[in-house]
Image (cartoon, rainbow, N blue to C red):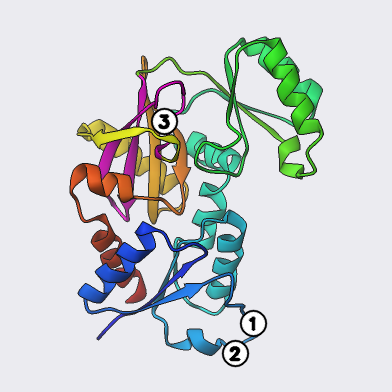
Amino acid sequence: MVTRLAIVYDRLRWEEKKLYTSAKDAGVEVTLVDAKTNGLTLFDDVGRWKDEDVVLQRCISHYRGLYYTAILESMGIPVVNSFETSLVSGNKLLTTLKLAKAGVPTPRTYAAFSDEAALNIMESIGYPVVVKPIVGSWGRLIARIDDRDDASLLIEARRLSSDPLQHIYYLQEYVDRPPRDIRAIVVGEDVVAAIYRYQPPGDWRTNVARGGRVEAAILTGEQREMILKAAGAVGGGVLGVDAMEAREGLLVHEVNNTVEFKGASQATGLDIASRIVDYAKIIGSR
């Protein structure tokens, strides 16, 4: 039986094109669906979706992808990743709660719901402190706060923001680590690739989107086990798990839902897209 797969996207990147060609090569009936121009009915008639076995949700926009997934799942269509996984892994605060409950080591993390509380936490744990938006990617709006003056500037900027999520403070200790982190690509129950992401000149962040250099990484059995545990904690699926090599061992600091894998594919020479398509076929056949 031929699997019917739809790839939902809102920007057609290298990854979506590679997934499409890999699916075609595997004999899968595959279509590309632009979420921006293809609306959905909220009633029982599933329309064009009635023939799909599985959907790969690849939207860059967290909220667009999240609610598209919710509607498709309400029609009984399996989606990779599921709504629950997308909800949790797309939100750093919810991810941290799941990781902590599962016993996955993370940086010390705090939440504050007012400017005063955020400043008090930063003062009490000591600088530097890393402040992140609870929803976001590519290292955008992540700040390293080195002193009280930095803290005051950040708080003033957030106070002026009309985005309610900017008034929720997610704060982490600054971890002493090598100038790199680990990005592991998890597909189902397997770590299919892992890379080191190195800081670009003049930046403390390691995001490839910000110019970070990548190279293949070889994980120990213990590291692979921890990464799989982190992926399982947020619901599993196709995920990017980011971890830091701290003095006390590996610390997982993020889990990414609609993970980009161009850099990992090029650095490792591995066909990650085919592994994702194979996983989607399994989900679609259940």
Instruction: Check contact, mark 2 vs mark 1: CB within 8 A.
Output: yes
Task: Rate crowding at label 1 as few (under 14), some (14 to 19) or many (20 or more) other CA atoms within 10 Å.
Answer: few
Tell me the number on the disc at residue 45. Answer: 2
Left or right: where 214 falls relative to 207: left
Residue span colored magenta: 179-208
Q: Is residue 267 above or below residue 67?
A: above
Left or right: where 144 falls relative to 266: right
Viewer-nearest of discs 2 and 3: 3
Viewport quadrant of the N terminus: bottom left
Distance between mark 2 and mark 3 Cα atoms: 45 Å
Is label 1 in a helix, a strand or a loop?
A: loop
Instruction: Name the amino acid, label 3.
Output: Thr
* Magenta stretch encompasses residue 195: yes
Residue 281 at x, y percent in the picture: 30, 72
Q: Quadrant of residue 68?
A: bottom right
Residue designated by label 1 = 41
Counting residues from the start of the chain, the first of labels 1 and 3 encountered is 1
Is label 3 in a helix, a strand or a loop?
A: loop
Instruction: Name the amino acid, label 1.
Output: Thr
Left or right: where 181 falls relative to 76: left
Q: Quadrant of residue 273?
A: bottom left
Q: Is residue 286 above or below residue 180?
A: below
For the point 56% across and 40% down, which residue is it? 92
Distance between mark 1 and mark 3 Cα atoms: 40 Å
Viewport quadrant of the C terminus: bottom left
Q: Is residue 44 above or below residue 62?
A: below
